[in-house]
Amino acid sequence: MSFQFRLEKVLQHRKTLEDLAKKNYLEAKTVLDEAEALLESFHQSIRQAQSERHKLVVSGQNPGERLSQISDYIKGTELKIERQKSMILKQLAIVEKQHRALQEAAIEYKMVEKLKERQLFNYRELEKKLEQKEQTEISNSRFEMRRRKDEQ
């Protein structure tokens, strides 16, 4: 007789759900990381434009049109930054939701897994008891046979 967990299909299903939740979480996290990297590139772009504007001002030339272009570029990039921040906040909410779903799926899987472990432990304990009982019976019957043999 071997151990068979009656809820093995449930355990497998919950593991599949946990794996799916993990995949969804990692995908959402990847999108968030990419959005944050894009935001940082916008900030870097503004710093470069500001540096270029500073060089033009310090050079003393008459860079009127170029300064205007740089200022317009900075304003446009600042608008992109605001939209990107908004998108990051939305994506952060999605990531948090996916993380909660992952945690719940992991808990549900662990519950069934712990149940399986307990049942396996109980099964092994029962097997040990039955084996001990069998050994005791064998020993008692041998003892009884020797006693009868000695009595004759």
Image (tube, rainbow, N blue to C red):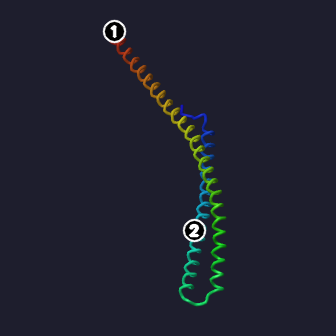
Q: Quadrant of the C terminus?
A: top left
Q: Residue at x 44, y 22 (%)?
A: 133
Please provide percent x and percent y for residue 23: 61, 54
Instruction: Report the amino acid beneath label 1.
Output: Glu
Say if 66 sits above or below 5 in the image.
below
Q: Residues within 10 Å of mark 1 (few under 14, many from 20)?
A: few
Say if 54 sits above or below 145 in the image.
below
Decide if residue 147 is on the left or right side of residue 124: left
Residue 23 can be seen, yes or no: no
State the mark number for residue 40: 2
Between the residue at mark 2 and the residue at mark 1, the CA separation in whole angstroms equals 97 Å
The quarter of the picture where residue 57 lies is bottom right
Q: Residue at x 63, y 80 (%)?
A: 70
State the count of labels. Answer: 2
The residue at which mark 1 appears reads as 151
Nearest the camera: 112 or 119? Answer: 112
Nearest the camera: 38 or 132? Answer: 38
Q: Residue furthest top?
A: 152
Q: Quadrant of the N terminus?
A: top right
Q: Residue at x 55, y 81 (%)?
A: 54
Nearest the camera: 89 or 11? Answer: 89
Q: Residue furthest left?
A: 150
Residue 139 can be seen, yes or no: yes
Please provide percent x and percent y for residue 125: 46, 29
Of the two numbered discs 2 and 1 in the rendering, the one whose residue sits closer to the viewer: 2
The quarter of the picture where residue 33 lies is bottom right
Q: Residues within 10 Å of mark 2 (few under 14, many from 20)?
A: few
Q: Residue at x 36, y 16 (%)?
A: 143
Instruction: Report the amino acid beneath label 2.
Output: Glu
Q: Secondary structure at mark 2?
A: helix
Say if 81 sits above or below 15 in the image.
below
State the mark number for residue 64: none
